[in-house]
Image (cartoon, grey):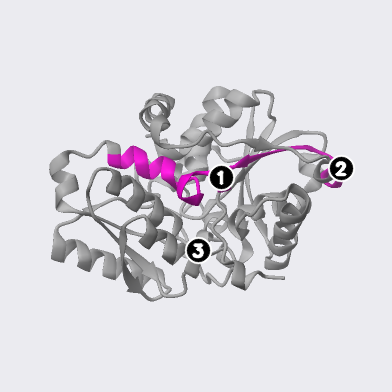
Amino acid sequence: MVTFVDIKDAHERIKPFIHRTPVLTNRSLNGLTNANLYFKCENFQKAGSFKIRGATNAVMLLKDQDINRGIVTASSGNHGAALAKAVSRRRGSTKVVMPENTPQIKVKNVLRNGGDIIWCEATQKSRDEILQKVQNETGAILIHPYNDEKIIAGQGTLAKELLEDYPKLDMIVSPVSGGGLLAGTISSAKVMNPKICIYGAEPQEADDTYRSIFTGEIQSNKTTDTICDGLRAQIGSITFPIIKDKVDEVITVSEEEIIVAMRMIWERLKIIVEPSCSITLAAIIKRSDLFEDKNVGLIMSGGNVDLSKLPW
């Protein structure tokens, strides 16, 4: 179980290697939603996403002999780039198993930060099989993108910063995929403010977390046909119990709603964000009755967007 002490220790450990990202507000979007919105901008984070937090924490806890064996992971892009950056800092090597349909900006980001890419098909089965094969053949150390307590603790530092800067938040909305960010947010925020409500935002086209909570058991994604390339992963065995027990609700959002929200953020906040974090605003717009007159933190999880393939 990830504790708040783990998150505080992780924060002290990673502070020299991350940005304390800004929080933006926008009167226009407040008026649209009838809420006070606070956008935690991890799109300005090192390597372009919140993933540097968990990756750095996990890598800093490795022994030198582990680094020397090499590191391996599977990623749709952001975790792979963040992990490669953290491992390169310790002069190690990182192999990243990535689906063939990964956006080019995320491919280039992994390579630029020192990662070696191994391709897989765009299915969880292919990803898991090739990851296992690489581990067996190389003896490399696996750092899982989300199903790892050290990763969750690192991701929990985001909500810790947000609530230190804005302690009067009533709610936080986080994207959810494998669950590392949402589990970390819950583990941090619910301790700092037991009355706060935490919501997950998930694509309807990859809604395994929503269905898993409904049934009480982990369900597989029936489809991952979503523009949110960072939200196609399967909920994890470590992250799911945390989310199931303490999340207030997971809100599912359509592709059209995500694209509309993404364009609003670009046009009104004047920042570049991914569909995978635009989903938080989409969830608030969809369920505006839930958030009306509340102080709401939105996690802008990353900004690695292929500018040649915008969805509008």
Amino acid on which disc 1 is placed: Phe
Q: Badge 2 local density, few (<14 within 10 Å), some, or many (20+)? A: few
Assign a secondary structure to mark 1: helix
> Label 1 to label 3, Cα distance in Å?
22 Å
Q: Badge 1 local density, few (<14 within 10 Å), some, or many (20+)? A: many
Residue 76 seen anywhere in this rendered image of the structure: no
Q: Quadrant of residue 18?
A: top left
Amino acid on which disc 3 is placed: Arg
Q: Which mark is residue 31?
A: 2
The part of the chain drawn in magenta is 32-59
> Label 3 to label 2, Cα distance in Å?
32 Å
Front residue of this view, candidates 281 and 214:
281
Residue 181 position (above or below residue 233): above
For the point 53% across and 29% down, the residue is: 160
Q: Badge 3 local density, few (<14 within 10 Å), some, or many (20+)? A: many
Residue assigned mark 1: 44
Assign a secondary structure to mark 2: helix
For the point 26% across and 36% down, the residue is: 61
The image shows residue 195 at horizontal and vertical percentages of: 64, 26
Residue assigned mark 3: 232
The image shows residue 279 at horizontal and vertical percentages of: 65, 55
Q: Earlier in the sequence, mark 3 or mark 2?
A: 2
User: Are the residues tagged 1 and 2 within 8 Å (C-beta)?
Assistant: no
Q: Is residue 234 left or right of residue 299?
A: left
Q: Quadrant of the N terminus?
A: top left
Q: Earlier in the sequence, mark 1 or mark 2?
A: 2
